[in-house]
Image: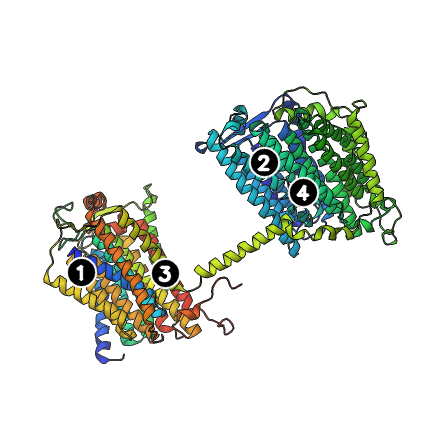
Amino acid sequence: MELLLLILVGVLYATGIFMMLRRSMVKLLIGLILLGNGANMLIFLLGGITRGKPPIIGDADKVLTGIYADPVPQSLILTAIVISFGLQSFAIVLLKRVHALIQTDDLNDLNTPDTSI
Amino acid sequence: MLIVVLSGFLFAFLTLLSGKLVRNSLSWFPALLPLALFIYFMSYIPVVAAGPVRFHYPWVTSMGVDLDFKLDGLAMLFSLLITGIGTCIFVYASYYLKGNKYLDRFFCYLSIFMAAMLGMVLADNLIILFIFWELTSISSYFLIGFNNEEKKSRRNALMALTITGAGGFLLMAGFILIGSISGTYSINSLIASGGSLQQHALYGWMILFIFAGAFTKSAQFPFHFWLPGAMVAPTPVSAYLHSATMVKAGIYLLARFTPILGHTTSWSTTLIIVGGITMLYSAFHSLQRIDLKEILAYSTIAALGTLVFLLGIGTSNALLAAAVFILVHALYKAALFMVAGILDHETGTRNIGMLRGLKKVMWPVALAGMLAAFSSAGIPLTFGFIGKELIYESTFHAPYIAVILTLIALFTNILILYAGFQAGIRPFTGKLSGVHQHLHIPSFRLWLPPLLLALLGVVLGIWPSLVDGPLIRPVYTALGETTILSPLLLWHGFNWVVVLSIVTIIAGCLLYYLFVPSRSYIPLTDKWLHLSPEALTVRLGRAFIHFSNRYTNLFHNGFLRSYVSVIIVFITCLLAMKLITGVDVHFDIKTNISDIRSYDIVIFLIIIAAIWKSISTSSRINAVASLSVVGYCICLLFVIYSAPDLAMTQFTIDTLTVVLFVLVLFRLPPFLKINDRRVILRDSVIATAFGLLIAIIALEVMNEPTTKDISKFYSENAYLLAKGKNVVNVMLVDFRGFDTLVEITVLTIAALGVYSLMKLRVSSTTKE
Amino acid sequence: MKSIILKTASNYLLPLLLLFAVFILLRGHYKPGGGFVGGLIASIAFVLHSFANGLQNTRKLLRYPPGAFIPVGLAISLLSGLAPMLIGKPFMSGEWLSVQVPIIGLIGTPLFFDIGVFFVVIGVTLTILFTISESIL
């Protein structure tokens, strides 16, 4: 299964970057989301995947015993998911704002190089 | 001692705080600081005459950087010059800039400069010395550009900062080089182990860097041009920084390093050549100027060249002459500058052709100017005479090419005399012009400081023993000299040196009477202007700006995708190279790999299909729907692979993201229809390469054994320490609670950002 | 989206979902759940309600602007961290009462921290969504 997830991570990264290279702002946003998912999956995969053993201590026990999923990447990803929501909403609003100002989806119309001497 | 050094900075701050008082009634108040410091240093004279005093305050001891200060003869001479002339300048400036709305700021800069200069001459640690060195450059920048509304001021200030800053940069390299070779940054230890560095293979680099610092700071050819430019500063600044103190910092540095790096052929030859060229070049240039301050600026450069030249000769005589000449020059040049400032202030012009006969209306100024001019000319009974005698003495008895050296000194001295007379005598003699009839004696705060300094030049000339034992000899000792020389005398008896002095005076007076300075001489050198060091520097600067523009426009072109592709391509190439050369990629994760079940494959295929759909569709709603499918499938993966918390979060967030998109999407434009096959192909290649690279790296990481100590700690202690059984949640709210606190703050900021962006009203004008 | 069915359903769903959100929040320390998920579920409940009944009604129901939840939540979290300092413990050290409560387990500072997170998440999510859906640019 690891190999399938590996391919998935690769595909998410590749498509994310591909979409970020488009001229359309909406596509840029889609690329951002795909890339975020890819990063989450990468962390998840590298933490090691375990089927059906959540990191929750049984009712009778005091410590986790036996095989269990790694809790550290999970808490990292949980944080990342919530933060990425904040990022996405901010990006969407920014995009909307820009669109309201310049009436276009084309990133080329935003182009003002720093130096124009 | 630390308080003494830092008091200027503190005082600068206070001046700013009480700006209104300083601007109005209490403008004389800042002068109390240099006066107090002057008295403080005076009280140390008997102690220092016996031997240096050292002060030690630990700072970064582990890196060999301590706040070490040493008050020896050299530091004492400079400290007295800084604080003594400083007092005069503070008093003078309080009237000179009376009514200026930035007077408080001026005193602030001036105090900072004074403190930095004191710190520099007192520092006994290379790094400390460097810090204060740079502070003097920066405060000088502010002072030159004090009239910052004028373009010329800003330009010249920047030019001065560029030149001295570049020199400072090289100086730092030199200090670090010396520090790492000798293993200590303490100047005292360096002097104690004197001589060992001269034999080192990197000695050439060391002196090159030190020279770069000293020559730029002390305006030696070919870095001299910033000093005449710096004359745009208010005259108190020119008198203080650009003749008496700051420009002598380079001389100080050379003198300080004479016992450490000096007395070699390369040291002496370089200093003599550079000093000699500077002397001749600037003395010649002072002939062509008609602006009082410019004449003085060029004669200052000539004097600085003389000092470098004397340090280069390096004999006991020459070092003694240098010590005396530092004092002589500081006294008369500061006085002359202040006189020039008074003339400018009262008459509104500095053109020497238009200033005549002013002795009738302002006799104290005339007296000050005349005495200072005599001292600069080396007329007997002035301190300048003694200085000049010593200079001829040392060139005359120089170990090699004594005749040539003497001729250079003679020529320069004649022109220094000429410059001194132009500034100190010409404006006061002759017939008073009609427009200046109404003038009268200015405030004593203007004429007293230069008169004091000029009088001091005469007093010391008559009784040189006043400074000889207490002040000059310790300097001489600090330069590492032990040979006992005869004391300073008013009259050495009749010999060749006296003849030279007389020749200087006669030739100088002839020049003064016969040569009429005029603007018409400037074109003579103008045709060489494009080859002057200044023009070359300006061209270099322009070329650099041009290059930066080209470079910036190439890489910082405003296209997000070009930044992304440059970054991605670079990272991909770098990592791929490392992977190809360094690591062998292999697939041997057969062990502890989990099996593939049928529903895994189904989910995988759905995700791939959804991703494909989301990037290939031309409809926005399809893209968003596909994205949510990707999200929900990932959520399923979390469920299967034991991450219930993640699954729940992913599910809710995904739902909210869809809601968000749906709310916004229909107000957004449809996708652009741009189908450039070549571009798509290029981007696909970049993206595929990057995805592949990430996958390979992930594979490599999975091949490596990992330690699970951290997870183990949390798993074992979640209940025992934190009384919770859901380890992920316990980590979030307890073990790593602080991170979560910051995270929710970040979320808050995102919400505030969204809110303000949406509620912001954009007026129609800014819509452009 | 003025469907009668949705409208009726959402009126019943809102309290149920909110109850569920609180349940998820409180059991978070022992079973899957916690402040983040609980807050998100509560936000979804309100978003659903606003779809069915219109934004104005949801705002009325909430009584306070959603942004007001944010400082409240941040304050609760911060205070739960500061509280142990009153008895001389370092910032954010966990302290528990010895009373055992069903579902929640022991009551302690981490619980209050999680409640703070819950409110911040509700506030942030609703602020973002309501702001965006309200403004027509």
Query: Disc 4 to disc 2, how far (Cα)?
Result: 16 Å
| Identity, as a three-letter code, of the amino acid under mark 1 | Leu
Residue at 24% x, 77% y is: C7
With respect to residue B476, does B721 lie above or below?
A: below
Dot 4 corresponds to which residue?
B242
**Element assignment for label 3:** helix
Query: Disc 3 to disc 2, how far (Cα)?
Result: 48 Å
Q: Earlier in the sequence, mark 1 or mark 2?
A: 2
Look at discs 1 and 4 and give the one toward the viewer.
4
| Identity, as a three-letter code, of the amino acid under mark 3 | Val
Asked if labels 3 and 4 touch by Cβ distance under 8 angstroms, the answer is: no
Q: Residue B120 carries which label?
A: 2
Look at discs 1 and 2 and give the one toward the viewer.
2
Q: Residues within 10 Å of mark 4 (few under 14, many from 20)?
A: many
**Element assignment for label 4:** helix
Looking at the image, which is closer to me, B167 or B437? B167
Query: Disc 1 to disc 3, how far (Cα)?
Result: 30 Å
Are the residues under marks 3 and 2 on the same chain? Answer: yes
Q: Which of marks 3 and 2 is nearer the N terminus?
A: 2
| Residue B348 in view (yes/no) | no
